[in-house]
Amino acid sequence: MKLIILDRDGVLNEDSDAYVKSVDEWIAIPGSAEAVGRLCKAGYTIAVATNQSGLARGYFSQDDLDAMHAKMTALAGAAGGSFAHIAWCPHGPDDACDCRKPLPGLIHQIEQQLGVSAQGSWMVGDSIRDLEAGRDAGCQTALVRTGKGAKSEAKLAQTAGLERSPVFDNLSAFADFILQSSEKG
């Protein structure tokens, strides 16, 4: 299985320092749903690993999160894509869970759910913590400049094991890279 794991906020949809709290606030980054569709059509399995501490903080409910994920899934579906699994951490930063990125727990949940190893797959995120989770699960890592990515880019060179992570303008550019690489070999 050719697995690609995506962070959500800042990769698939616009991020917000005030949290994305409702389906109306969940706004797709242009080209992201189409990128998921192109990757799926090329035989890739797409999963999502997302911290959602807004649940623990009371900023939105599980129903709100489900509605956001339904919108995300519908947009990807309209572009010919799908998500094999969406894993989310509902905990706050002080909850001492094992799933909040930068820990790799969400990736391990995806591995369990799909019955595969994430070793060698891709983890695409817009923050260092996304990439750290991928690195610690044995994934190749890639940063996108959307969301918090432009701010995170400067920290890549100082973060052990992430120095060689490729950087892309957005998920669509990452998909172009992957699809061109798979054509070559």
Image (spheres, rainbow, N blue to C red):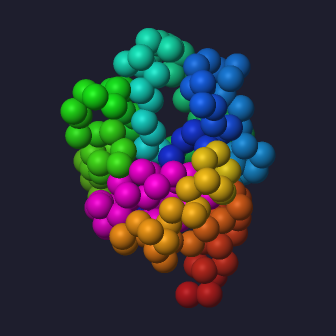
Q: Is residue 134 magenta?
A: yes
Picture coordinates of residue 19, whole percent (x, y): 57, 26
Q: Is residue 39 left or right of residue 131?
A: right
Residue 159 sits above or below residue 7 on the image: below
- Which residue: 44% across, 12% down? 58
Residue 32 sits above or below residue 75 on the image: below
**Label total for image:** 0
Q: Is residue 83 left or right of residue 168?
A: left
Task: Choose between 118 and 55: the one closer to the eye.
Answer: 55
- Which residue: 50% across, 14% down? 59
Residue 167 sits above or below residue 60 on the image: below
Quarter of the picture holding the C terminus: bottom right
Q: Is residue 38 magenta?
A: no
Instruction: Place residue 71 in its image quadrant.
Output: top right
Which residues, given as a range, are shown in magenta?
117-144
Picture coordinates of residue 5, whole percent (x, y): 46, 54
State whether residue 128 appears in this view.
Answer: yes
Picture coordinates of residue 34, whole percent (x, y): 72, 51
State whether residue 120 appears in this view.
Answer: no
